[in-house]
Amino acid sequence: MIERWALISGLMGDLETYELIQKDLKNTRGDITLFVLGDVVGPDKNCDALLNRLINPHRDDLKPNCIYGWWEEQLLAELGYRGERKSDALRLNKGDDAVIALINAVDPYYLGWISSLQFGFVELDCGLIHGSSKDVGDILTMQTPPLTLLDRITRLNVNRLFTARSKQQFHLELTDAVVDSKIKDLNEERNQEHTLPKRAVIGIGAGANYTLYDVGSDKTHFLTVSDVTKSRGLGFA
Amino acid sequence: MKHAVISCLHANLSAVEAVLGDIDRQGIETITCLGDLVGYGPQPNEVVELIRDREIETCQGCWDEDIIDGLDACDCSYPSQLAERRGHIAHQWTTEKLTYGNKQFLASLPTSIRRGRSFFVHGSPNSQHEYLLPDMDAFAALERVEMSGADTLFCGHTHFPYVRELGNGSIRVNIKNASDREREVKEMTLPIRRIVNVGSVGEPRHGGVNATYVIYDDINSDVEIREVAYDIDRTCKAIIDAGLPHVFAWRLSNGFEFAELAEDASHVCER
């Protein structure tokens, strides 16, 4: 059976979209593992129902494997789970009202679970992270300089990095990388040509836009839950 | 014009005096210091005051930062608990000995200095604790220089002096976007950049006992790594007299690093 990963992020309390994705995945062929790359909470709606569903999946749900995202980081920082740091990034960008709205959107009952979430997963030779290996808030896009992308991949010692923070869907491959290095120290001078195997950064999208990844063939499929018909047409049904 | 760049003085007055003497004899007036004025060595106040008196432009090193802010490096910076204990002893001793005025001076230091197309840091543009070792991944090394917005990145921290030139680089970028139909292929040339690690004045780790620093000529871009002999016995005696761990004197007199080098040098402490 084909091994596939379903990668979602940015639900921000939207249980309805999560249910649509679960329904979509039930109609998709393959042995599917579901990864939720953060931002399950947000300030715009109450997130308790979605959190409850993630913690207590329905019997026929794909079990979600969750990590924390930028919004969870802001919530945890503001509520003292990150030492002396507060949600300065959120406060700076969206003001005090957004901080208050975020706190009000999550019942304190769920904070223990949120604080237990990991920064990311390493599966096979792939890193699955909300932002990047540098920071949960790091935004990687198709326009990010290749050297920056390589650095973020290298830090995790993986070949592929799945990221969600940009909300964009893309599959960017870095190939044929080469650079000459000349090192001189007190003892010697040496030249070396450095090359890299193919590396990739995959933006998985957010909300209704999610990504299916075929582990065996290294193929990505960018889907939208409203596109059930389209996805069936691609052969997933 | 020629510039001298020094780093990692580590409270070794004898070594600092010898290096400054070598610089003076060559008529070089511009000196930049990349931090770690204190730590491990027995003369922290004397070294800080010498740098202040000479008005040497200096950026803050990891030891300077730790003395001000409390221990910033986590256990992972040390390869063993023994090495960590010795590091903590040196930290505590230095904290007690350093005057308030000299602590204030260390606290006032910037974390980087930019001069034209050159950028000066203690560890890397990422962190004062990151080691840019000569054999680190070439693409990551190039990224560190690129993120500084400079052509040449001057750093210390490793205590191992080297010059690394990175050039003739290229990469191909293939992009598939969400529509699944639009694909873009870009061939990109990577920039030519250079890392100059100036080594250490006060605690060399290059296999010899001499202090090291570099002279940089901004007209022809030449970099010379200089070795300077100094009165090691004087420093070693002062280490013993101060009650600091004897291994600090032993490794200075033998000319190699012992046990204090992190095994995972690429690790950046997040604490």
Image (spheres, coloured by chain):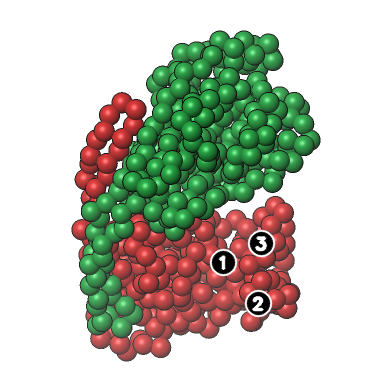
Chain colours: A red, B green
Compared with A67, B51 (above or below) is: above
Furthest residue in direction right, as rendered: B100
Q: Which quadrant of the rendered structure holds the N terminus of chain B?
A: top left
Q: Are marks 2 and 1 in contact (CB under 8 Å)?
A: no
Compared with A114, A122 (above or below) is: above
Q: Chain of mark 2?
A: A
Badges 3 and 2, same chain: yes
Of the residues shown, which amino acid type is indicated by label 2? Answer: Lys
In this view, the mark in front (2 or 1)? 2
Which residue does the numbered mark 3 point to in the structure image? A76
Left or right: where B109 falls relative to B76: right
Which residue does the numbered mark 2 point to in the structure image? A94
Q: Which label belongs to residue A70? A: 1
- Provide the secondary structure element on which disc 1 rests: helix
Left or right: where B185 falls relative to A22: left
Residue at the image point whose x is 53% and y is 25% from the top? B21
Residue at the image point whose x is 39% and y is 60% from the top? A148
Of the residues shown, which amino acid type is indicated by label 3? Answer: Leu
Compared with A177, A106 (above or below) is: below
**Residue B99 is drawn in which quadrant?**
top right
Residue at the image point whose x is 46% and y is 75% from the top? A167
Earlier residue among tags 1 and 3: 1
Earlier residue among tags 2 and 1: 1
Q: Compute the Cα span from label 2 to label 1.
A: 14 Å
**Residue B63 is drawn in which quadrant?**
top right
Q: Compute the Cα span from label 1 to label 3.
A: 10 Å
**Residue A214 is drawn in which quadrant?**
bottom left
- Please name whichever residue, A191 or A39, is drawn nearer the observer in this view of the structure: A191
Q: Tell me, yes or no, if residue B269 can be seen here.
A: no
Q: Chain of mark 1?
A: A
- Provide the secondary structure element on which disc 3 rests: helix
Q: Position of residue A211 (x, y in %)?
A: 37, 73
